[in-house]
Amino acid sequence: MKLAIYGAGGHAKVVVELAKQLGYRTICLFDERWKKLEPLEGCEVIGGWQAMLDYLSSTESCSAHVAIGHNITRLDRLKTLQQLEVRLPVLVHPRAYVCSSAQLGDGSVVMANSTISVGCEIGLGNIINHNSSIDHDVILADGVHIAPGCNLAGEVRVGCATMVGIGSSVIQQIVIKDRAIIGAGSVVVKDVKPAEKVYGNPAKTH
């Protein structure tokens, strides 16, 4: 199997290792800084965004992934690839648990020791990072990043391009709107407005 990955930073390093575990044997990396970057986990960085598009158009049976932590940029790249009808597989670590009724959006990644429970809906290009728990009937919109060690209780709603920081917890039925940022270690006990930045226990704007 062949996989083209856009991004060659720290997050990409983890994705490359996961892709190898999932059986991808040909992995090519693309990044705008490609001339300055060394191979990543044995994979060459061979060009920027346009080079990746050219590679995909000329290479048979090649899937793609966008391994960038920045939510809006990742989502923008993925939407372009969708329009070009490029395959965007969901990458699920063998040690993650995903309930059979959960729906995972194209281009999402679920890291080791994470759990996605019954009835969840995960949008396009989500990152569910290591050791996170997504409880029943949670809905994550497109481009969400759930950082390592987060806990989302049942029926939580998270808006597009939102970042939930490392080690945060969100109680049941909370609604977090688009482009919000939840600071590391926060406990969210009330709804969060669009583009609002909250942190602390309980989480609030400061």
Image (cartoon, grey):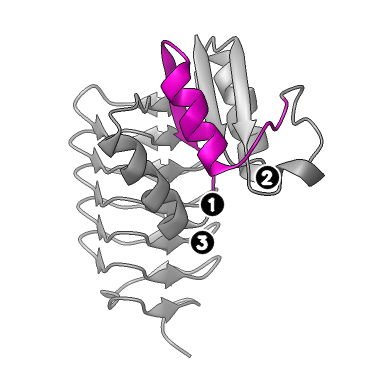
* Residue 174 at least partly seen: yes
Among the two numbered marks 2 and 3 on one chain, the one whose residue lies closer to the N terminus: 2
Task: Name the kind of residue labelled 3 in the image.
Answer: Gly
Label 3: element kind: loop
Q: Which residues are magenta?
A: 44-68
> Which percent across, then down, holds residue 144?
38, 53
Q: Quadrant of residue 39?
A: top right
Q: Residue at x 45, y 28 (%)?
A: 64
Task: Name the kind of residue labelled 1 in the image.
Answer: Gly
Label 2: element kind: loop
> Which percent across, then down, holds residue 17?
64, 24
> Which percent across, then down, holds residue 183?
51, 70
Among the two numbered marks 3 and 1 on one chain, the one whose residue lies closer to the N terminus: 1
Residue assigned mark 2: 9
Task: Name the kind of residue labelled 2 in the image.
Answer: Gly
> Which one is closest to the eye, mark 2 or mark 3?
2
Q: Is residue 190 magenta?
A: no
Q: Quadrant of residue 99?
A: top left
> Which percent across, then down, holds residue 194?
29, 76
Q: Is residue 55 magenta?
A: yes
Residue assigned mark 3: 165
Cα gap from disc 3 to disc 1, whole angstroms: 12 Å
In the image: residue 66, left or right of residue 16: left
Residue assigned mark 1: 69
